[in-house]
Amino acid sequence: MSSVLKKSKQSSVNDLLTALNKFMELLEGQEEFDAVLDLKKICEDLQKYKPDEEAFQSALRDLEETYDGDHELRAYTLRRKRAEDDWTEAEELYLASIEVLNLINRLSKIDG
């Protein structure tokens, strides 16, 4: 029998901030400068508030909106099929975007 360790809220927030910074770095390489500016503002809000606060949850919603709104970051969540075995920036963007999205979902569902 195996046991599942639950992550603390703060641990999940730290994971999100780390993943978000990596994603922003990759987006800069794609010249997604407007998206990066908005993500930096959201990142500041996530650092400023506690996960239980409405302002934090609002920042999470804003972050999720960047995937479907003007920036359409959801496009990076689509896996690219490649014949080559080379690791590319497209795969890095895919993994980073999925990680951020999964952490948004995890933190949106935390309630104590």
Image (tube, rainbow, N blue to C red):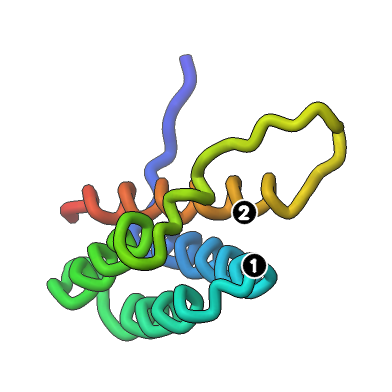
Report x, y in % for residue 17: 48, 69
Q: Is the residue marked by circle 1 packed among few (<14), some (14-19), or many (20+) residues within 10 Å?
A: few
Q: Residue at x 41, y 51 (%)?
A: 101
Q: Is residue 41 above or below residue 14?
A: below
Q: Which residue is mark 2?
A: 93
Which residue is at the far top?
A: 1
Report x, y in % for residue 22: 61, 66
- Number of numbered labels in the structure image: 2
Amino acid type, callout 2: Leu
Q: Residue at x 34, y 76 (%)?
A: 46
Amino acid type, callout 1: Gln
Q: Residue at x 42, y 32 (%)?
A: 4
Q: 57 or 78: nearer the eye?
A: 78
Q: Residue at x 32, y 82 (%)?
A: 45
Q: Which residue is mark 1?
A: 30
Question: Which numbered disc flags the more N-terminal residue, 2 or 1?
Answer: 1
Report x, y in % for residue 99: 50, 50
* Foreground: disc 2 or disc 1: 1
The reply, left or right, for residue 84 in relation to residue 55 is right
The reply, left or right, for residue 43 in relation to residue 84 is left
Q: Quadrant of residue 42?
A: bottom left
Determine contact: label 2, label 1, CB under 8 Å.
Answer: yes
SS at circle 1: loop
Q: Is residue 48 above or below residue 68?
A: below
The reply, left or right, for residue 83 in relation to residue 58 is right
Report x, y in % for residue 89: 73, 54
Which residue is at the far left?
A: 54
Q: Quadrant of residue 27?
A: bottom right
Q: CA distance from mark 2 to mark 1?
A: 10 Å
Q: Is the residue marked by circle 2 packed among few (<14), some (14-19), or many (20+) residues within 10 Å?
A: many
